[in-house]
Image (cartoon, rainbow, N blue to C red):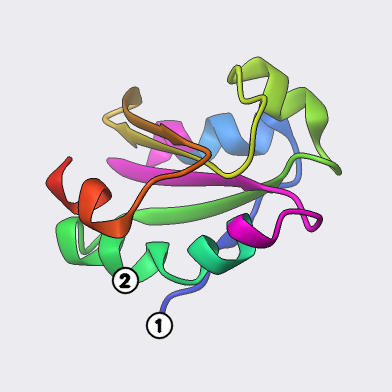
Amino acid sequence: MQHYSSIESQQHLNQVIKQNRAVLVYFRSLSCSVAGAVEDKVPACALEAFPGIQLCLVDIQTLPDIAANFQVFVEPTLLVFLDGNESIRKSRSFSMLELEKE
């Protein structure tokens, strides 16, 4: 199973989005048990839809500026970028079935 790449800065995330056709950014915090449970299920779902997708993880407690720049205020939040443009946004409670339909 492919693991998430940890994002270290806004510049790093911008570079990843620019350099990859498909990018999934998962925003979470360690204090949210729901985010932890969903975090383990997202890669398989995303990789099935987009085999070459780049998976990125942003901890909103460690990097609140990145979350704010993307207007992410709840966890978990999942953003999918295709060709540099945000295509999917899911926040708080969403199912893998719902994500697959997107």
Q: Residue at x 40, y 82 (%)?
A: 1
Residue bounds of the magenta highlight: 17-34
Answer with the quarter of the image where residue 97 lies: bottom left
In the picture, measured across the screen, residue 83 lies left or right of residue 74, that is left
- The residue indicated by pointer 2 is 44
Of the pair 9 and 76, the residue shown nearer to us:
76
- Left-right relation of 30 to 39: right
State which tag comes first along the sequence, 2 or 1. 1
Does residue 98 show up magenta in the picture?
A: no
**Which mark is nearer the camera, 2 or 1?**
2
Along the horizontal axis of the image, is 15 left or right of 24?
A: right
- Residue pictured at 72% horizontal, 54% vertical: 32
> Against 18, is 34 above or below?
below
Q: Residue at x 40, y 62 (%)?
A: 42
- Give the percent coordinates (x, y) of residue 79: 43, 35
Residues at badges 2 and 1 in contact (C-beta under 8 Å)?
yes
Mark 1 element type = loop
| Element type at mark 2 | helix
